[in-house]
Image (tube, rainbow, N blue to C red):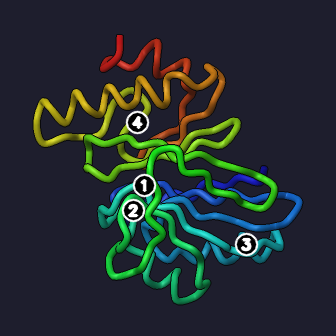
Amino acid sequence: MIFAHFLVPEVNEANMFVVACPETRKAMLIDAAAYDARIPAFLERRNLTLESVFITHAHYDHTGGLAEIARAYKPTVFAGVADVDGVSAQQVTHGSVITLGAIQARVVELPGHTPEEIGLVFPSMAFTGDALFSGSIGGTTNLHNKATEIDAIRKHIFTLPDECLVHTGHGPSSTVAIEKNHNPFFV
């Protein structure tokens, strides 16, 4: 699988990721903090076609560039809601399978930071948006939402193989083993 990380420091230190199928050259953008010139350059350099965008949740630092990206590429947008900042999305829920060329990914629900928060799990990596960070979890508005978020992470992320990479909405990436064994919210 082709993979690239783009840090957007001017938008709340947000992470955006491109994953692509090496066989079909179909690419997906995960979160769209901004329309960043590095992404079209990367797509062109690697001869990739942006087919889809996956939105983990509808906060501005994950969607700020979505309208411009949608105009430029006409991708299928996958999200936990049917409309993201005025852009129509294919609403996906827990267990939905998204195909990217010869690669399949599974949607997992990770509510707590927002009610519609979702993650995307590929065979060797998971994208958790603002649900799980390296050494932390996403902010919640009350203790019930915090408990819901922790429970969802345990059920849907910590059951993945220990070596599975965890790519977060902000901050560094990690692994399931590191977060399961060292994240203070879980030990």
Circle 4 Cα neighbour tier, 10 Å, few/some/many (<14 / 14–19 / ≥20): many
Q: For the residue marked with disc 3, what is the amino acid?
A: Leu
Task: Give the residue type at disc 2.
Answer: His
Q: Which residue is mark 4?
A: 133
On the image, the x and y values in percent for residue 16 come to 52, 58
Q: Which residue is drawn at the image coordinates 76% and 52% (left, top)?
A: 103
Q: Residue furthest left?
A: 142
**What residue is shown at x 79% (from left), y 58% (from top)?**
21
* CA distance separating discs 1 and 3: 21 Å
Name which residue type carries label 1. Answer: Thr
User: What residue is shown with label 1?
Assistant: 56
Secondary structure of the residue carrying numbered label 4:
strand
Q: CA distance from mark 4 to mark 3?
A: 27 Å
Residue 62 is tagged as: 2
- How packed mark 1 is, by other alpha carbons closer than 10 Å (few <14, some 14-19, many 20 or more), is many
Q: 102 left or right of 151?
A: right
Question: Real-space Cα distance between discs 1 and 2?
Answer: 8 Å
- Which of these two is toward me, 142 or 5? 142
Mark found first going from the N terminus, 1 or 3: 3
